[in-house]
Amino acid sequence: MRIATDTGGTFTDLVVEDADGLRLFKAPTTPEDPVDGLLDAVDRVAATSIRRTVEPRRAGDPDALVADNRAILARLDWKPMLDNLDTIVSHALAWERQLDERRAAA
């Protein structure tokens, strides 16, 4: 399994490549370290440890990213249905497992 992330704003786009092909996810991230926050949540929920490879920054990459949705919450009449990363990852994994079961039964 290979996982790629693109961190920006308050969400991280996640692409998973495994035996079933490519799957896409979107998840909120932690302001302190968005990528590690997401991978830590996947580790906890999936009861596994994702191999992590740290690469050097690319030309044009910012020195730091901060993801925070407080401004949106303060200005809009909106609240996310799920605001706990472990819960969100758990729902995503349950969905993927359900799809795998359907494929196996077909």
Image (tube, rainbow, N blue to C red):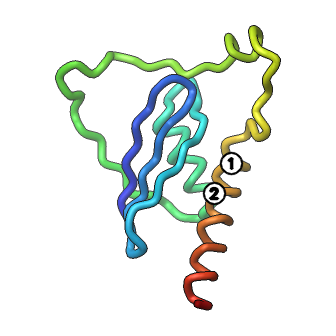
Point out the image quarter for the C terminus: bottom right
Judged from this view, the residue extending furthest toward the left is: 59
Disc assigned to residue 92: 2
x, y percent for residue 22? 39, 62
Residue drawn at 44 percent across, 20 percent down: 65
Quadrant of res 94? bottom right
* Up/down of 101 relative to 33, above or below: below
Q: Mark 2 belongs to which amino acid? A: Ala
Percent x, y of residue 91: 70, 57
Q: Residue at x 65, y 20 (%)?
A: 69
Identify the amino acid type marked 1. Ile
Rendering coords of residue 39 (x, y %): 50, 47
- Residue 91, relative to residue 12: is it above or below? below
Q: Which residue shows up at 77% across the image and 10% down it?
A: 74
Q: State the SS at label 1.
A: helix
Q: The N terminus appears in which quarter of the rendering?
A: bottom left
Q: Which mark is residue 11?
A: none
Q: Is residue 52 left or right of residue 23?
A: left
| Residue to which mark 1 is pinned | 88
Q: Residue at x 24, y 39 (%)?
A: 55
Dot 1 and dot 2 residues touching (CB under 8 Å): yes
Label 2: how many residues lie within 10 Å, few (<14), some (14-19) or many (20+)?
some
Q: Left or right of 93: which side holds 38?
A: left
